[in-house]
């Protein structure tokens, strides 16, 4: 199998996996980065969202051979000390319920805020609509994004 | 069930020293006098009902509280410790919470289901905190050579009220641990609560937001292998033949084994196993009824007409009442199957060795899972350990042990530690669904618009009693008949958040809206009149609190400005939900010809609110869940096979579809009656009644998206 040299959260990793392996499973099974979650495998739920080259992608359908030298960021690398404005806001607003979808929610929101630090309510809803939360924590997810935006 | 009695109260404290890190005060709470809530006696949840817990105070003042119950988003890991910390007068910032493994000796009712954890444990947890506090005060009084009544506690310190001197709990832990606890310790007056009733953030937030919260799928053990199982694609079929040659030859595959109706592909990584499984050539043959949803629709009508009927409740003489009626209203309501769809699909880790078993993963019923594993493998329970991870949602799906047992069985066959992983497709097509149900209602009105007769007949699939015969309006109608029929199917069903009532409440509250309108009465006033009748002239047994129900109705009417608003159409619903009471008003506006749900008001009486923040999550999440599934939820079958298998085909509610929610709680100081489920059942009715008000279209079948006016709307 081919060997892939990956740059994830600023660190260098090597993974010996098949070329069609989704980035999600490389992160989880081969690099031990299990913060990124599996929810559907077909890019419908957003639980697996990570950043590739600064953009939000669904890692369950983004195969490892496409990563090449692009920088990958996962929830574990969103900030060094867990103090990204979204992480602070998520705690302050007390967003998580079961918590399973939250890494994906935050990575989706982080890509939005990077591109547009002051999104309108409509822009937040349009982007966050991509991510499912089965606990129905949508009100606080929305509030968390708004609160983080104010910290930027 | 463990018998609770007072006689063992005196010896319920055990002292264990913990080398190197202060002292561990071990409490067992068999003695506390909380009554087993009715729901548990009724609920069909297996599981051990013995309870005690574990609380340690380190010499640095750190308080560690073990949280026994599975955490699936109901926030039990925060609310349980809050109750202990309240009576302990602890400094909340020094409390650490650890998920306890299964331990049926130390813990009672270590399960998540039936909205029963807080109701069951409230007094036990308070006694635990108060006991520790008492020991700390006694130790401080001895050290100062004063009487205990000269000491008070605050925020982790004992204070000498004469001198103002203080000692921290950590400084006193060692001495305190040598003392014994007297019986009948007083508990705090609720007006002195500082932690209970406040908003406390989820104690696991920091882990979750940094990707460190460990769910079942995240668990890893050195030497572990991964497995996926191909199960029969249709209910009512079994394996005829298996050709796994291609799968076995694929990279990373260790073995393919068949057991029962399962073909398990075992390998070195998830993706390799997932890919190899697609190459399996398995033939299936008929092994029971092969059913389709279209058959069920016909079957329901015939069973309602001519099925084997079980009577559930009968008051008065319905035949005469309907014969004498000035007006009769008849209506039928139906819901489809729905899967639970927790965001984390089913999975479990099992390591079965010669004479011991290690189980790790997400289950709502660890004790039941262990007992079932013991029976399956013929290994005694005391040789089996079960450790809980976080659960990525449950909604009732993880009350079943199927996915635990197949992991244990596979590990025993391959003789390796294994994690069995379900894909989303496996999860959605794997059974244990909320069953399809149909209800037939009939009401008789006299010439003054009084409801003199009421009939409800339910028919469901593998659901047993699809009614809740003692819920409102039973007790308020002179002549009443509630009965049910059932169809037994190979399609597996099980409890789904707010079992039965998740759909019954919608049907009943919609029908009562129909009756109120036919009687020419305001829907809120109609309910209040019925409750007044139940109070002054009750019929048969009444199993709900008239006062509590009346209070939530009146409060939601006031909060929502019921009947006073222009520009919005309001719909009302109220339900005695498990052991709590929730009333809701939904507001709808029209966007051209399509109704838009703008806002839902909810007033909940769940007794004492432990954590305001967590309580709001349960109510808001419950409403979103109830609304989302009423609007979109539908799993259909063709020739025994589910027709939807992932989120591209099964629609879940998303952010742009949620209404504004305004949630209030009744402040009455009643001991907690549960909140994980209660806010969900009333929502469908409030929404449908508001839509009727706006459009004159009565929604009788779920999901609403398949019914007019939604089915006629563009791009809904």
Image (cartoon, helix red, strand yellow):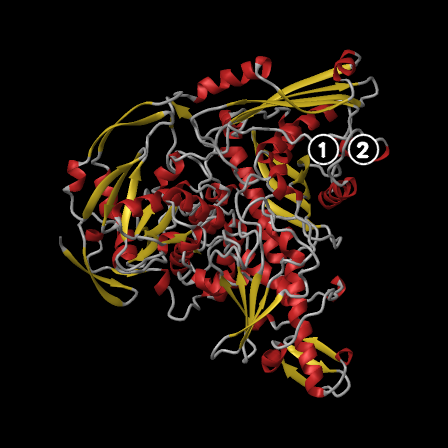
Name the residue tied to disc 1: B472
Graded by Cα atoms within 10 Å as few (under 14), some (14 to 19) or many (20 or more), the crowding at tag 2 reads many
Name the residue tied to disc 2: B534
Residue A137 image position (x, y, % from top left): 52, 50
* Quarter of the rendering containing residue B649: top left
Q: Which badge, 2 or 1, comes first in the chain's sequence?
A: 1
Residue A78 lies left or right of residue B716; in this view the side is: left
Q: Nearer the viewer, residue B450 or A84?
A: B450
Which chain hosts label 2? Answer: B
In this orientation, does residue A105 appear? yes
Which chain hosts label 1? Answer: B
Residue at horizontal 30%, vertical 40%? Answer: B229
Residues at discs 2 and 1 in contact (Cβ within 8 Å): yes
Q: Nearer the viewer, residue B249 or B30?
A: B30
In this orientation, does residue B385 appear? no
Pointers 2 and 1 within a single chain: yes
Q: Nearer the viewer, residue A15 or A144?
A: A15
């Amino acid at each position: 199998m081919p060997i892939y040299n990956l740059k994830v959260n600023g660190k260098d990793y090597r993974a010996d996996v098949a070329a069609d392996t989704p980035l999600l499973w490389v992160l989880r099974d081969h690099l031990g980065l299990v913060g990124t979650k599996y929810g559907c495998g077909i890019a419908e739920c957003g639980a697996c969202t990570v950043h590739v080259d600064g953009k939000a992608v669904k890692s369950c359908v983004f195969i490892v051979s496409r990563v090449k030298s692009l920088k990958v960021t996962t929830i574990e690398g969103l900030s060094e000390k867990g103090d990204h404005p979204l992480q602070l806001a998520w705690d302050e607003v007390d967003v998580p319920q079961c918590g399973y979808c939250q890494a994906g929610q935050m990575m989706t929101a982080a890509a939005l805020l990077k591109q547009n630090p002051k999104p309108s309510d409509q822009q937040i809803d349009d982007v966050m609509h991509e991510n499912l939360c089965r606990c129905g924590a949508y009100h606080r997810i929305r509030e968390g994004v708004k609160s983080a935006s104010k910290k930027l | 069930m463990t018998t609770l009695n007072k006689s063992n109260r005196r010896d319920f404290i055990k002292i264990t020293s913990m080398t190197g890190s202060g002292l561990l005060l071990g409490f067992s709470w068999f003695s506390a006098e909380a009554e087993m809530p009715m729901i548990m006696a009724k609920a069909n949840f297996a599981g051990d009902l013995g309870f005690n817990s574990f609380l340690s105070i380190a010499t640095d003042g750190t308080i560690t509280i073990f949280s026994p119950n599975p955490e699936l988003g109901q926030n039990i890991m925060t609310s349980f410790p809050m109750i202990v910390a309240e009576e302990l007068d602890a400094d909340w910032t020094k409390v650490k919470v650890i998920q306890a493994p299964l331990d049926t000796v130390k813990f009672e009712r270590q399960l998540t289901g039936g909205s029963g954890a807080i109701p069951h444990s409230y007094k036990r947890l308070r006694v635990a905190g108060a006991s520790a506090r008492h020991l700390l005060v006694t130790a401080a009084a001895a050290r100062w050579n004063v009487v205990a009544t000269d000491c008070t506690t605050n925020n982790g310190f004992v204070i000498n009220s004469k001198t103002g001197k203080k000692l921290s709990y950590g400084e006193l832990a060692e001495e305190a641990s040598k003392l014994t606890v007297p019986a009948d310790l007083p508990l705090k007056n609720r007006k002195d609560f500082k932690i209970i009733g406040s908003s406390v953030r989820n104690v696991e937030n920091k882990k979750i937001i940094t990707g460190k919260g460990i769910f079942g799928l995240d668990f890893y053990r050195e030497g572990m292998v991964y497995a996926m199982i191909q199960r029969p694609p249709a209910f009512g079929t079994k394996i005829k033949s298996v050709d796994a040659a291609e799968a076995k030859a694929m990279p990373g595959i260790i073995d393919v084994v068949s057991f029962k109706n399962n073909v398990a592909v075992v390998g070195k990584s998830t993706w390799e196993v997932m890919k190899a499984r697609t190459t399996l050539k398995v033939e299936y043959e008929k092994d029971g009824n092969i059913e389709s949803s279209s058959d069920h629709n016909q079957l329901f009508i015939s069973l309602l007409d001519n099925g084997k009927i079980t009577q559930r409740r009968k008051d008065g003489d319905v035949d005469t009442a309907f014969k004498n009626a000035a007006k009769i209203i008849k209506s039928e309501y139906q819901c489809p199957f729905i899967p639970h769809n927790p965001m984390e699909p089913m999975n479990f880790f099992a390591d079965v060795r010669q004479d011991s078993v290690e189980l790790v993963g997400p289950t709502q019923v660890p004790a039941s899972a262990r007992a079932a594993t013991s029976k399956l493998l013929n290994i005694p329970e005391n040789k089996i350990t079960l450790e809980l991870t976080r659960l990525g949602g449950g909604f009732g799906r993880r009350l079943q042990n199927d996915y635990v047992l197949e992991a244990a069985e596979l590990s025993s066959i391959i003789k390796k530690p294994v994690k069995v992983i379900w894909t989303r497709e496996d999860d959605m097509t794997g059974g244990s669904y909320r069953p399809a149900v149909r209800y037939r209602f009939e009401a008789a009105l006299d010439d003054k618009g009084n409801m003199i007769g009421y009939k409800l007949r339910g028919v469901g699939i593998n659901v047993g009693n699809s009614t809740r015969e003692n819920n409102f309006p039973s007790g308020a109608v002179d002549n009443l008949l509630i009965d049910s029929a059932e169809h037994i199917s190979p399609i597996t069903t099980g409890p789904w958040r707010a079992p039965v009532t998740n759909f019954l409440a919608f049907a009943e509250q919609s029908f009562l809206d129909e009756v109120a309108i036919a009687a020419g009465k305001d829907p809120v006033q109609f309910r209040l009149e019925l409750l007044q009748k139940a109070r002054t002239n009750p019929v048969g047994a009444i199993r709900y609190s008239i006062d509590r129900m009346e209070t939530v109705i009146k409060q939601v009417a006031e909060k929502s400005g019921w009947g006073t608003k222009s520009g919005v159409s309001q719909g009302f619903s109220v339900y005695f939900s498990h052991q709590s009471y929730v009333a809701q008003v939904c507001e709808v506006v029209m966007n051209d010809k399509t109704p838009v749900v703008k806002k839902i008001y909810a007033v909940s009486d769940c007794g004492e609110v432990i954590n305001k923040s967590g309580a709001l999550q349960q109510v808001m999440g419950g409403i979103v869940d109830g609304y989302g599934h009423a609007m979109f939820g539908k799993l259909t079958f063709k020739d025994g096979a589910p027709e939807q298998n992932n989120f591209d085909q099964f629609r879940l509610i998303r952010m742009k579809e949620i209404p504004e929610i305004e949630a209030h709680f009744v402040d009455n100081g009643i001991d907690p009656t549960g909140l994980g489920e209660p806010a969900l059942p009333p929502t469908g009715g409030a929404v449908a009644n508001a839509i009727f008000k706006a459009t004159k279209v009565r929604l009788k079948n779920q999901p609403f998206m398949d019914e007019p006016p939604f089915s006629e709307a563009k791009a809904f």
